[in-house]
Image (cartoon, grey):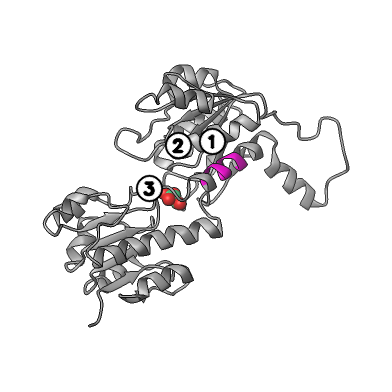
Amino acid sequence: MPGPKILATRPLFEDARSILQEKCQVEYWREPERIPREELLARVQDKQGLVCLLTERIDEAFLRAASQLRIVANVAVGFDNIDLPACTKRGVAATNTPGVLDETTADFAWTLMMAVARRLGEGEALARSGKWTGWDLDQLVGADVWGKTLGLVGFGRIGRAMARRAGGFRMKVLYIDVRRVPEDLEKELNAEYRDMDTLLAQSDFVSVHVPLLAETQRLFTTARFARMKPTAFFINTARGSVVDEAALVHALETKKIAGAALDVYEKEPFINAGLKRPNVVLAPHIASASLETRTKMTCIAATNIRDFFDGKRPANIMNPEVLKTTE
Ligand code: DGY
């Protein structure tokens, strides 16, 4: 019997394709450019499952076009591209890929932090330019990272992975989250809870690790940047919309902060021209982009789809209430 029809908006990786192809009939979008919206809406019409990326909007209009859809598997932990209540209302299961990208994302946030503190972007440009005249005493002097204070805004899996790295750099770790973690975990990670204003005022590096929710939208405002030390750096590997980008540009222009290192932006792939300055390190949303991690992410998405059509509860279902009628 032919299996359920699935659309994958990228060819994924070999391991994930093997999982999907065990039981499903899979159509992959293989063009080099992203799937255009109208193409997505046309191709999803006869599909029961979708494997999608965070660049595809799963909203009411999409769900109307996808009348046979039973599950959408996002290849990302963040799911701000998915209208979850709309999926639930239509009985469409939605899954994400938590857990597998925490260490890789923390590695990259650390990379950004080191790069901006030590002016790696400027140094690399100079080294390649042919204009380097040799070692000099005050050339590209940056800031130390070791021994400084790291403020973590968001203390979930990725925030905690950052705290563990900070131990090796003998940093003091401050954190804020919606709730304080148990004391033994604070001790283990050597992390101290602070309210937002205090954390901003005391940190040399502020690194963001919150999901994009209504409550975290534009969490970083002009007032909040103004509370940071003028020598401090702002790192964002979470979501661009957690920051009022105009406020960040203003903080950089007026030297309220020393610099920023960003992997995410308000309107990707557009990057505000005001951010393109020497004291800002810019990356194109690649914090989870190691081959190992991206392979795992696609395998998780594929497994969620396979399990769903095998009648099992997908491990990463975000709206389990849609299963109630079938469980
Ligand atoms: C996510 O998973 O949400 C990241 O932004 C991409 O890995």
* Quadrant where the image shows the N terminus: bottom left
Local SS, label 2: loop
- Asked which quadrant contains residue 144, the reply is top right
Q: Is residue 174 left or right of residue 37?
A: right
Amino acid type for the residue under numbered disc 3: Gly
Magenta stretch, overall SS: helix
- Residue at the image position 46 percent from the left and 45 percent from the top: 265
Per the image, the residue denoted by label 2 is 209
Q: CA distance from mark 2 to mark 1?
A: 9 Å
Q: Give percent across and percent down for residue 76.
A: 40, 53
Which segment is the magenta one?
A: 105-111
**Camera-nearest residue between 111 and 15:** 15
Amino acid type for the residue under numbered disc 2: His
Per the image, the residue denoted by label 1 is 162
Local SS, label 1: helix
**Camera-nearest residue between 266 and 232:** 232
Question: Quick check: 188 above or below 28?
Answer: above
Question: Quick check: 34 above or below 185?
Answer: below
Q: Give percent across and percent down for residue 8.
A: 36, 69
Query: Mark 2 vs mark 1: which is more N-terminal?
Result: 1
- Asked which quadrant contains residue 52, the reply is bottom left
Q: Dots 2 and 1: beta carbons under 8 Å?
A: yes
Per the image, the residue denoted by label 3 is 78
Q: CA distance from mark 3 to mark 1?
A: 18 Å
- Residue at the image position 62 percent from the left and 25 percent from the top: 171
Mark 3 within 8 Å of ligand 1, using the beta carbon: yes
Query: Mark 3 vs mark 1: which is more N-terminal?
Result: 3
Local SS, label 3: loop
Residue 106: say if magenta: yes
Q: Give percent across and percent down for residue 285.
A: 50, 50
**Camera-nearest residue between 269 and 101:** 101
Q: Is residue 110 left or right of residue 209?
A: right
